[in-house]
Every structure is written in structure tokens, then in C-alpha cells.
Amino acid sequence: MKIIKADNPDLETVKDITYTTINQVYPKYYPKGAVDFFLAHHSSKNIEDDIAAGKVFLLLDDSGTVAGTVTVDGNDIGRFFVLPQHQGKGYGRALLSHAEEIVKKDYSQIVLSSSLPAKAIYMKKGYISADYNIIETENGDFLCFDTMIKNI
């Protein structure tokens, strides 16, 4: 496996990983309005801007297949997704470790927003919940998530 920095031609790949994972996993945890909010938050424009700024990384498995992505913006780790068919293989752990190493170069604390399905993963890696957030979305649905931190 290897982790590479995403480039402009990788926009659709990053978007596909993000949207596929959200559409397959998040409806099990969130109502439709919240899922739609996640999809809009990770718009093509936002992904494109992050790629142009050099903030997006892709994980390739041993055969060169792209399996996951993560975005590092300052001390914030976000857009962290591993395709469902590649979960449970250590790819998420590798991506998160890579992102943490980048943050460690300039910061003493990592901050991230944790979805409900990812919270247990972050807790196992030493993150603690610093704040609980609720955003009202379309149709009166709510998106609930934790702001988590890890001192490094």
C-alpha cells in the first residue's frame, strides 16, 4: 500500500470515494437530510479547492487500486473515507497515521469532526470528544457529530 498526494485529475476519484462511502454507510446512522448535508459539504468545488491547495491524499492498495482518501488542513483532519469494500484491512489506520504525521510537523493538537460511525475508531486512536454539535438540516432532520481532539 502507498499514500500519495491527490492531483487535479484525481477529483472524480476523491469524489467517488467520498460519495460512495457516505451513500452506503451514513444512511444507517443519519436521516436523509443529514446525509444530503454531508454530500453537499463535500461538493466538487470544495474537493477541487482542497486538491489545488495540496491538502488531499489517496491510499492505493498493493495492486494500485485507490481505496481511501483523507484531507489535512492545518491541524484539522477531514474528508477521511475508506471505500466500504476496503474497510477492515488497515487502510483507515494507515491514512489516519499519515494525516497525523503531517499535522505533527507544525501543531501540538489535532482537531477533527467525527461522524457517528467513525467515533469509536477515533476514540481507539486516543481522540477525546471536546464538543457535541447539532446542525438542523432539510426536512427538520438533524446532523449530530463530535468535535474531537488529540494532543500530540
Image (cartoon, grey):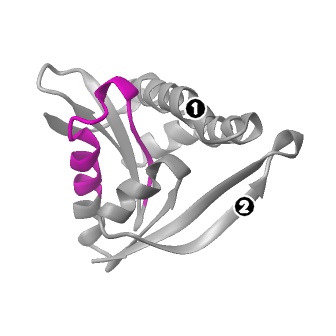
Q: Nearer the viewer, mark 1 or mark 2?
A: 2
Instruction: Please provide percent x and percent y for residue 17.
Output: 43, 28
Callout 1: SS? helix
Residue depicted at 13% across the width and 19% down the height: 63
Question: Which region shows up in magenta?
Answer: 77-99
Residue drawn at the location 45% of the way across and 50% of the way down: 118
Q: Quadrant of the C terminus?
A: bottom left
State the residue position of label 1: 44
Front residue of this view, candidates 67 and 9: 67
Q: Are marks 1 and 2 in contact (CB under 8 Å)?
A: no
Circle on res. 134:
2
Image coordinates of residue 83 in percent, x first then y, are 38, 29
Picture mark count? 2
Q: Quadrant of the N terminus?
A: top left
Q: Nearer the viewer, residue 123 or 1?
A: 123
67 sits to left or right of 16? left
Q: Is residue 120 left or right of residue 24?
A: left
Report x, y in % for residue 113.
Answer: 52, 59
- Tell me the amino acid under the disc marked 1: Ser
Mark 1 and mark 2 lie on one chain; the one further toward the N terminus is: 1
Number of the label disc, if any, that sits on residue 53: none
C-alpha span from label 1 to label 2 = 24 Å
The part of the image, by quadrant, that contains residue 44 is top right
Question: Residue 91 in magenta?
Answer: yes
Q: Nearer the viewer, residue 116 or 67?
A: 116
